[in-house]
């Protein structure tokens, strides 16, 4: 079975910190990897598509990198509104999620 | 502006049936690929079903034969008919649009379905 392994499962960081979340695919998936933020209020937003492309309207502090099977979501300067859970996704498969909190 | 609003969730006994709806605005469901996803309490996101603009449908193994996705173009609404419900179907059900780049680009805020006696 195809799997997406996301880490860490949770993190706590200070406002202004650089935050990195990783996603590892069990097979080569080229660049077909997307990232989402789900807020505590159940709003789900597409942040990054095709591994590196910033969705329209998403702040530029979010960026994506990687290819083949290893991918990274970076928040360059964490803001209070960034709290929530982040998921990577390939077609019908999601990573397990990373819960981001503010210290 | 694209908006998706789910409705129809509630408490249902095991073995029962329920239909959830997703009202769309800002685009036409008839020419948009769309999907249902779900999230069990405290768990991650799980894809449930696709309906493509050509009408073809696909389902996760966990729901095949029990769930049916459909749309009413005149009402600009997406549906998920859920039969033979099980406790493990308890979840918030979300509808989302599916972009050609294989991303779910717009989401509703979900409707909670609880299967319990």
Image (cartoon, grey):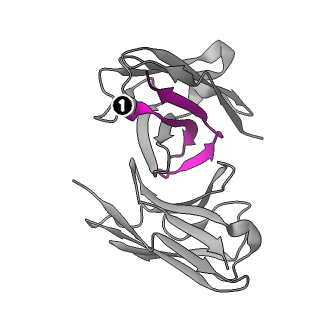
Residue reaching furthest to the front: B117
Residue A93 in the image: above or below residue B91 = below
Q: Quadrant of residue B16?
A: top left
Residue B93: in magenta span: yes
Residue A93 in the image: above or below residue B52 = below
Q: Report the residue marked by disc 1.
A: B58
Image coords of residue B63 (percent x, y): 33, 29
Residue reaching furthest to the bottom: A17
Can see residue A48? no
Image coords of residue B6 (percent x, y): 64, 29
Q: Residue at 41%, 20% (x, y): give it.
A: B68
A19 and B41: which one is in front? B41
B48 and B92: which one is in front? B92
Residue B45 in the image: above or below residue B108 = below
Q: How many marks?
A: 1
Query: Which quadrant, please, contains the C terminus of chain A?
Result: bottom right
Left/right of residue B16 with respect to residue A57 in the rendered view? left
Give the letter of the chain under mark 1: B
A49 and A38: which one is in front? A38
Residue reaching furthest to the right: B1
Residue B109 in the image: above or below residue B87 = below
Residue reaching furthest to the left: A1
Q: Residue at 61%, 27% (x, y): give it.
A: B29
Q: Which residues are magenta?
A: B88-117
Q: Residue at 46%, 52% (x, y): give it.
A: B44
Q: Residue at 45%, 69% (x, y): give it.
A: A9
Left/right of residue A100 with respect to residue B17 in the rendered view? right
Image coords of residue A37 (percent x, y): 60, 60
Mark 1, Cα crowd under 10 Å, few <14 / some 14-19 / many 20+, is: some
Considering the numbered disc 1 on the image, is that residue within a helix, a strand or a loop? Answer: strand
């Amino acid at each position: 079975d195809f799997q997406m392994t996301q880490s860490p499962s949770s993190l706590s960081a200070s406002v202004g910190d650089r935050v990195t979340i990783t996603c590892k695919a069990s097979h080569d998936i080229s660049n077909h990897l997307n990232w989402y933020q789900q807020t505590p209020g159940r709003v789900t937003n597409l942040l990054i598509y095709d591994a590196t492309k910033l969705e329209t309207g998403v702040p530029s502090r979010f960026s994506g990198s990687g290819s083949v099977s290893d991918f990274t979501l970076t928040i360059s300067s964490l803001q209070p509104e960034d709290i929530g859970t982040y998921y990577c996704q390939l077609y019908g498969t999601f990573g397990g999620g990373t819960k981001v909190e503010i210290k | 502006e694209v908006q998706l609003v789910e409705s129809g969730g509630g408490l249902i006994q095991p073995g029962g049936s329920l239909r959830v709806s997703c009202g769309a605005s800002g685009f036409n469901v008839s020419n948009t690929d769309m999907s249902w996803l779900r999230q069990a309490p405290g768990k991650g996101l799980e894809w449930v079903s696709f309906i493509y603009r050509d009408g073809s449908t696909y389902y996760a193994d966990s729901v095949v034969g029990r769930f049916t996705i459909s749309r009413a173009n005149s009402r600009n609404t997406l549906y998920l008919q859920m039969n033979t419900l099980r406790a493990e179907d308890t979840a918030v059900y979300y509808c989302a649009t599916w972009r050609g780049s294989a991303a779910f680009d717009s989401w509703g805020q979900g409707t909670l379905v609880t299967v319990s006696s």
